[in-house]
Image (cartoon, rainbow, N blue to C red):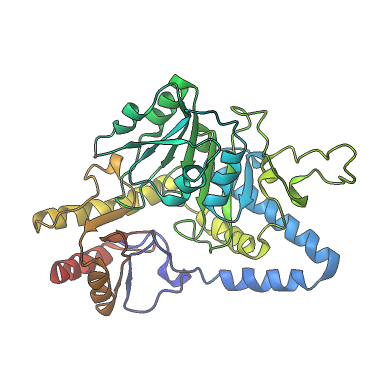
Amino acid sequence: MNPLFDPADFRLPPGIAHVCAGGETAALRSHDEALLRYVADKSSGLPGRTAQEDEIENARTHMARLWGVTNGDIGFVSNVAEGVAIVAESIDWREGDSIAIDANEYPSVVGPIALRRKPVVALRQGRGTEPDRLAACVDGSTRIIAVSYVSYLTGERVDLQAMRALADSVGALLLVDFTQASGYLPIEASIADFAFSACYKWMLGITGVTVAYWNRARQPEWAPLSAGWYSFATGSRGYDTLPALKPDAMRFTRGNPAHCPIYVLNSALSYLSRFDMRDVRTHVQTLTVALLEDLAASQIPVMTPADPARHGASVCIPSPRAREVVDALHAQGVYAWNGQERVRISFHGYNSMADMERTAVALRSCL
């Protein structure tokens, strides 16, 4: 199977199998032009600032199309933890309240709530591998069900329809992190009340900006508890009457948006818009399934469910020698990722079946 994306469009070192999209993807060569355009606009006075604001709107349009929502539902924060914190501080927490999470949930999804002290919010943790394990964690005290669509640790994909039904059954918010999914899976963000995604993985951007989604249809009265100058409606001045917040999800953005990463994100989203996410999903999961089958035949245990409906674009292999293994793979020209005592192999559109086969051979030699 040939690559879906043209590898020549990326800064891929020759002779390398770059299979670490879950950590960092290879950069698009078109980002050079985006960065230079940002620098030129920054140097152009007020017209340059107008150009920067236009870039933000273009990126919102691309994101809205990618996630099946409207432009006004899309804002930007600096990282997932900041976005979750803004939502968390807006909730009128009560004694005895809880959130439901997987025991292996990503820290940025949990940390902004877990450290609250007045009141303390209980963490109800689903454990094990059963798809419905969060159901036992949800009751009348649950204020938020917080999930990653695809797990950073295991590559497992959750059933968001089931999570939505579970949240609705107790009147809880559904908060979703799409970081390990957006850019290769079709996303219907409207299933969530709030959603976030970092941009430097499968969305082909860089660090410094994260997409923030506010479901205005489900939560029309939502407002953050704090704001910065950019959060307020244009033309706001004076505080005898508090200025109105922006009417859309840009109220998430307190100060200047991260213009430079947004220029790059816009470049990346323009590239991704050339592809149907259903085709990207099929491409990467053809590779994950092939690798899972190879590892099973070699009796190498994995953490990732075999069913494509239950995993994303990553295959995760438990190993107390994960760092040593990833270093050895790198020496063989296979760029993988480690951490949390597991080796993670992640595919994207620039990968081919030859990359998968080379990775499988290298894994067998290292493990």
Quadrant location, the N terminus = bottom left
Above or below: residue 136 compared with residue 207: above
Left or right for 244, reference 259 = right
Front one among 305 and 351:
305
Left or right for 197, reference 53 = left
- The image position of residue 162, as x and y in percent, is 37, 28
* Residue drawn at the location 56% of the way across and 53% of the way down: 210
Q: Quadrant of residue 2?
A: bottom left
Left or right for 128, reference 226 = left
* Residue drawn at the location 38% of the way across and 63% of the way down: 350
Above or below: residue 307 compared with residue 290: above
* Residue drawn at the location 34% of the way across and 63% of the way down: 351
Front one among 335 and 87:
87
- The image position of residue 213, as x and y in percent, is 58, 42
Above or below: residue 360 compared with residue 289: below
Front one among 73 and 321:
321
Quadrant location, the C terminus = bottom left
Q: Quadrant of residue 251?
A: top right
- The image position of residue 147, as x and y in percent, is 42, 40
- The image position of residue 131, as x and y in percent, is 28, 34
Above or below: residue 290 compared with residue 139: below
Left or right for 40, reference 25 = right
